[in-house]
Image (tube, helix red, strand yellow):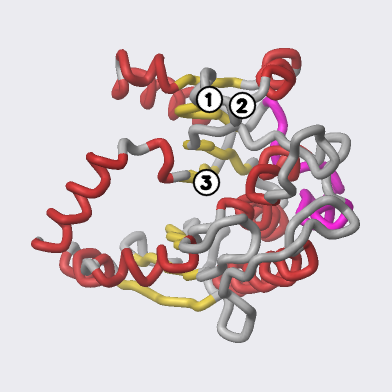
């Protein structure tokens, strides 16, 4: 039985799926302010895995490829490496008796479907849920009018495997071949409905397909109550929950202040 105080920490320092550099610095940045020391002080046993020891991680400017996506081949290589590492970390644990806590420090949101796929394959008899904490719904697709080819903006398209998703991302799915997310196992938490990144047809898709959405406006009015609501909704439907955290849901001023306090602590 895996001890309840054990954390598998997986780093995936990549900068390949976006149009601006910097995300690859997230894992080292969080560790530099004492993340591991703080967890061990609290009594957690930490096992550290590097998902990308030999993969390219640096951002380079590129042109949109034939499938209207930036760095598609490199993105797929990174995703495959992350899935392999997460799968190996899961295999080291007796998940039938206790599902270990996995903390995955990536920086690139596009690995979310990969992690969900690894979990669903390793625990095919369990229902895996997703708390999608993000300002954007990430429902763009490669040939969408106005798309800049940013694969990180297509995450929910690849989670659901809806029409027009990249063919190469279909490998990150459930054992039955379906998308790792549907209306029964995900809550979109913190979505900013007024953001220009969330186009009207994206919001219309979520509405028409009956997805559970709790907007940033609702959270601003009652953060604790809405969080409890989201957790209760998921716990009634799934066995395990993956939390995807896009840091753009955090006010930059608050985030920088908390980082400073953490560094001093």
Element on which disc 2 rests: loop
- What range is drawn magenta here? 167-183
Q: CA distance from mark 3 to mark 1?
A: 25 Å
| Residue 47 in the image, given as x and y percentages of width and height | 40, 76
Foreground mark, 3 or 1? Answer: 1
Residue 166 vs 168, above or below: the answer is: above
- Which of the labelled discs sits on residue 195, or is there none? 1
- Which of the labelled discs sits on residue 198, or is there none? 2
Marks 2 and 3 in Cβ contact (< 8 Å): no
Residue 7: image quadrant is: bottom left
Marks 2 and 1 in Cβ contact (< 8 Å): yes
Q: Is residue 210 visible?
A: no
Return the disc, 3 or 1, that comes first in the chain's sequence. Answer: 1
Q: Residues within 10 Å of mark 3 (few under 14, many from 20)?
A: some
Q: Is residue 3 magenta?
A: no
Residue 261 vs 156, above or below: the answer is: below
Q: Residue at x 61, y 56 (%)?
A: 18
Q: Is residue 179 magenta?
A: yes
Lateral position of residue 185 relative to residue 254, left or right: right
Q: CA distance from mark 2 to mark 1?
A: 6 Å
Q: Nearer the viewer, residue 245 or 239?
A: 245
Where does label 3 land, which residue?
242
Q: CA distance from mark 2 to mark 3?
A: 23 Å
Element on which disc 1 rests: loop
Element on which disc 3 rests: strand
Q: Residues within 10 Å of mark 1 (few under 14, many from 20)?
A: few
Q: Residue at x 26, y 65 (%)?
A: 35
Q: Residues within 10 Å of mark 2 (few under 14, many from 20)?
A: some
Q: Residue at x 67, y 44 (%)?
A: 155
Residue 97 vs 223, above or below: the answer is: below
């Amino acid at each position: 039985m895996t001890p309840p105080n054990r954390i598998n920490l997986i780093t995936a320092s990549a900068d390949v799926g976006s149009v601006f550099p910097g995300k690859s610095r997230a894992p080292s940045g969080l560790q530099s302010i004492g993340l591991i020391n703080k967890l061990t002080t609290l009594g957690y046993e930490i096992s550290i895995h590097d998902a990308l020891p030999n993969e390219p991680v640096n951002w380079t400017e590129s042109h949109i490829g034939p499938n209207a996506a930036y760095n598609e081949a490199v993105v797929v290589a990174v995703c495959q490496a992350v899935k392999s590492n997460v799968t190996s970390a899961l295999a080291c644990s007796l998940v039938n008796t206790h599902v270990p806590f996995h903390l995955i420090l990536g920086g690139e949101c596009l690995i979310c479907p990969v992690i969900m796929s690894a979990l669903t394959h390793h625990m095919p008899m369990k229902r895996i849920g997703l708390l999608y904490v993000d300002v954007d719904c990430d429902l763009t697709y490669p040939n969408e009018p106005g798309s800049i080819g940013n694969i990180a903006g297509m995450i929910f398209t690849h989670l659901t495997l809806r029409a027009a998703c990249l063919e190469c991302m279909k490998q990150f799915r459930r054992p039955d071949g379906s998308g790792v997310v549907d209306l029964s196992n995900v809550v979109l938490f913190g979505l900013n409905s007024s953001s220009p990144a969330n186009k009207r047809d994206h919001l219309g898709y979520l509405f028409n397909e009956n997805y559970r959405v709790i907007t940033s406006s609702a959270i601003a009015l009652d953060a604790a109550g809405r969080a409890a609501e989201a957790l209760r909704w998921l716990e009634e439907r799934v066995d395990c929950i993956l939390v995807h955290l896009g840091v753009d849901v955090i006010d930059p001023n608050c985030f920088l202040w908390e980082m400073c306090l953490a560094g001093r602590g």
